[in-house]
Amino acid sequence: MKKILTWGGIAFLVFFVAFRPESAGSVVMTIAGSIGDIGSGFATFISNLVS
């Protein structure tokens, strides 16, 4: 079952990028921005612990 879901996810990803590249780029930029915000929050937290 896990193998089927993995291949299905990969197929969906390829389809999404091939037929909606603008939307796919927007999703990636949103996710990357969120990861950057989380990293910045952790850095601020650690910095405040050390100070």
Image (cartoon, helix red, strand yellow):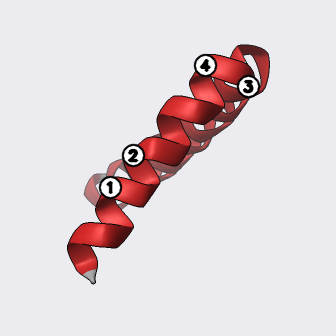
Residue 27, given in percent of the width and then of the height, sits at: 68, 34
Which amino acid does the dot numbered 1 rest on? Trp
Q: CA distance from mark 1 to mark 2?
A: 5 Å
Mark 2–mark 4 CB contact (< 8 Å): no
Task: Read off the residue under disc 3.
Answer: 26
Mark 4–mark 3 CB contact (< 8 Å): no
Task: Read off the residue under disc 4.
Answer: 18
Residue 19, given in percent of the width and then of the height, sits at: 71, 21
Which amino acid does the dot numbered 4 rest on? Ala
Mark 1–mark 2 CB contact (< 8 Å): yes
Question: Which numbered disc, 4 or 3, marks the residue that appears first in the sequence?
Answer: 4
Between disc 1 and disc 3, the foreground one is 1
Q: Is residue 31 above or below residue 8?
A: above
- Of residues 11 and 31, the one nearer the viewer is 11
Left or right? Give the position of 45 relative to 7. right
Q: CA distance from mark 2 to mark 4?
A: 12 Å
Task: Read off the residue under disc 2.
Answer: 10
